[in-house]
Amino acid sequence: MAGLSTKAIKTRIKSMQSTRQITKAMELVAASKLRSAQAKAISSRPYFQTLYAAMDEIADTNNDFTSPYLHANPNGKPAYVVIAGDRGLAGGYNNNILKLAYSQMEEGAAVLPIGKKAVEYFKRKNVTVITESYAEAASVSIGDCYTIAKMLADGFLDGSFGKLTLGYTNFVSMLSQTPSTLDLLPLRVSTEKRPSQNTILYEPGSEAVFNGRLAIVPEYLGGVLYGALCESTASEQAARRTAMDSATKNADEIIDDLNLRYNRARQGAITQEITEIVAGAEQS
C-alpha cells in the first residue's frame, strides 16, 4: 500500500468500515438465531432416542423376530440424505459435511440433498439427485422430515434403495461442530434375546408395528432426520457467528493499520509542505 495518497487511504478506510458493519450485523443475527436453534437441537434428541429404545425392545423380546428393515438389499442403490446450508459465509460448515459425505459415497449412489449448497454441490459432482424439493433447508419443516422418511422407507422396502445413510453436522458446542454420517437403514438393533422389561401391548402386534410402512420405523427415521436438521441448523449458525466474529476482528485490525498509514502519510505531507515553505523563505 506504499505510495497511496491520503485520499486513497481514506477511501479504503471507509470501505473497510462498511464491510465491518456488515460482518458485525451478520454476527449478531447469527447469535440471535443460534439461541433458538440450539434449544431445538437439545429438545429433539430424546424423541428419537426413545423411539430407538422401543424398536430395540421389540426386536430383543420377540422370538424368531424378522424384519426387512434389518437387512440390506444388494440390488438397491445406496441412498444418502445430506444436510447443508442455503448460504455461505459460515466458515467450513458446508464444505466439511459435503466433502465427508461425497468421500463415503459408493458408485451409483443417489442423494437427497437438503439445502441449496448441497443441491449445487452434488449436481456439480454428477451424483443422481432423488429430488430437489428440499433445496431450501430453512423452509424444511418437521412434517417434511416425516414425508422424506416415509418415501425413503418405502423405497427401502421396495428394493429401490439398498441402504440409507444420513450426513449432517453434529452440534457439540458454540465453538465446535463435527460433520458426521449415520447409517439409518438397515437398522442395527441388538440380536440378544431377553425377557421383556415392560408391559406394553402393541396393536395389531409388536412385529406388525415394527415392520409396517406407517408404523414405528418411518416415525423413527423422521425423528432422526428432524433431529439432524436441528443439529445442522444450530451448527450452521454457530459456524457463521464464529466466522463473522473473526471477520469483524480482522476488519478492525485492517482499519487500525490504515489509520496508522493515513496519519503517517498526512504527517509526511505536512512535513513536506513545511520544508517547501522554509526552502522558499530562504531563497527569498
Image (spheres, grey):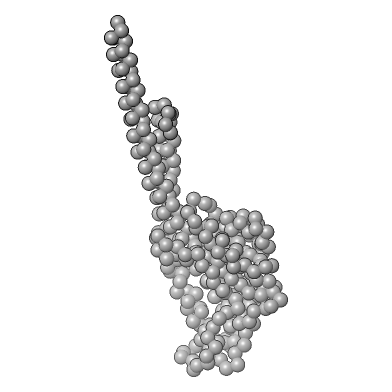
Quadrant placement of the N terminus: top left
Taking the image as shown, residue 242 lies to the left or right of residue 134, namely: left
Position above or below: 59 against 24: below
181 or 113: which is nearer to us? 181
Measured as percent of width and height from the top left, residue 176 is found at 42, 62
Measured as percent of width and height from the top left, residue 225 is found at 54, 68
Position above or below: 250 against 160: above
Number of numbered labels in the structure image: 0
Q: Could you tell me which residue is drawn at 40 percent across and 34 percent down?
A: 13
Q: Could you tell me which residue is drawn at 47 percent across and 54 percent down?
A: 91
Position above or below: 38 against 90: below
Which residue in the rendered view is the most extreme toward the front? Answer: 283
Taking the image as shown, residue 109 lies to the left or right of residue 63, namely: right
**Res 41 quadrant in image:** bottom left
Measured as percent of width and height from the top left, residue 118 is found at 59, 58
Taking the image as shown, residue 227 lies to the left or right of residue 162, namely: left
Q: Could you tell me which residue is drawn at 66 percent across and 75 percent down?
A: 162
**Res 171 quadrant in image:** bottom left
Residue 146 seen in this snapshot: no
Residue 168 seen in this snapshot: yes
Measured as percent of width and height from the top left, residue 92 is found at 49, 56
86 or 248: which is nearer to us? 248
